[in-house]
Image (cartoon, grey):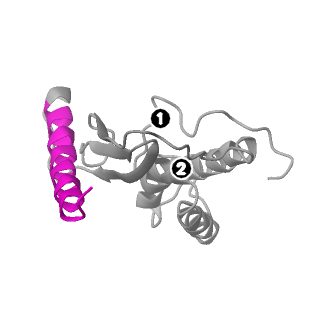
Amino acid sequence: MEECKSVSTLMGHKEKFQKNDGSIPADEKVYRSLIGCLIYLTATRPDIKFPVSVLSRFLNCASELHMVAAKRVLRYLRGTLLYGIKFCRVQEFKLQGYSDSDWARSMDDMRSTLGYYFTFGLACFSWCSKKQEIVAHSIAEAEFIAAIAAVNQALWLKKMMDDLHM
């Protein structure tokens, strides 16, 4: 993959995956190894966490479409090797949070994926991306569930900051 053409995005905007998508099955040993390496890499590259978590749902039924998407993550990494996170000094440390969700992204069980992240100062220090436990009947309901998860995390973080006298 050293000579591959890089891409600027991790996944296509409308890309949805299924367990039985009708395409050619991929070599499961290679796919599992690749996803395992990408999961290990998420410790230092949190920007790839979402697509890697989506692709890891298909470890036992990987197809060529899943393999192409996993290789796209590698192509993204190729183009972002020199990217980094710069931590700057700030005058005011303020807790800020953001949440989002997608509606029925999983074609197999029609569950949505929620995500949130929190910054303190300029640094992102808490984030989550996971499949919702219930099926949302509308995009508004999916967003509401994601907002509730973010508020729960914000309350916990605020309590922790109060305990640390921050």
Residue 30 magenta-drawn?
no
Q: Residue beneath label 1, please?
A: 15
Q: Residue furthest front?
A: 91
Left or right: 129 in relation to 76? left
Stretch in magenta:
141-166
Residue 150 magenta-drawn?
yes
Report crowding for label 1: few under 14, some 14 to 19, many 20 or more residues within 10 A (C-alpha): few
Report crowding for label 2: few under 14, some 14 to 19, many 20 or more residues within 10 A (C-alpha): many
Q: Residue beneath label 2, please?
A: 48
Residue shown at 18% from the left, 64% from the top: 163
* First along the sequence among labels 2 and 1: 1
Give residue 105's position: percent from left, percent from top.
33, 39
SS label for mark 1: loop
Residue shown at 54% from the left, 38% from the top: 11
When the figure is inspected, residue 72 is found, relative to residue 12, above or below; the finding is: below
Residue placed most toward the observer, 111 or 10 = 10
Give residue 79's position: percent from left, percent from top.
73, 41
Measure the alpha-carbon separation of dots 2 and 1: 15 Å
Residue 53 lies in what quarter of the image? bottom left
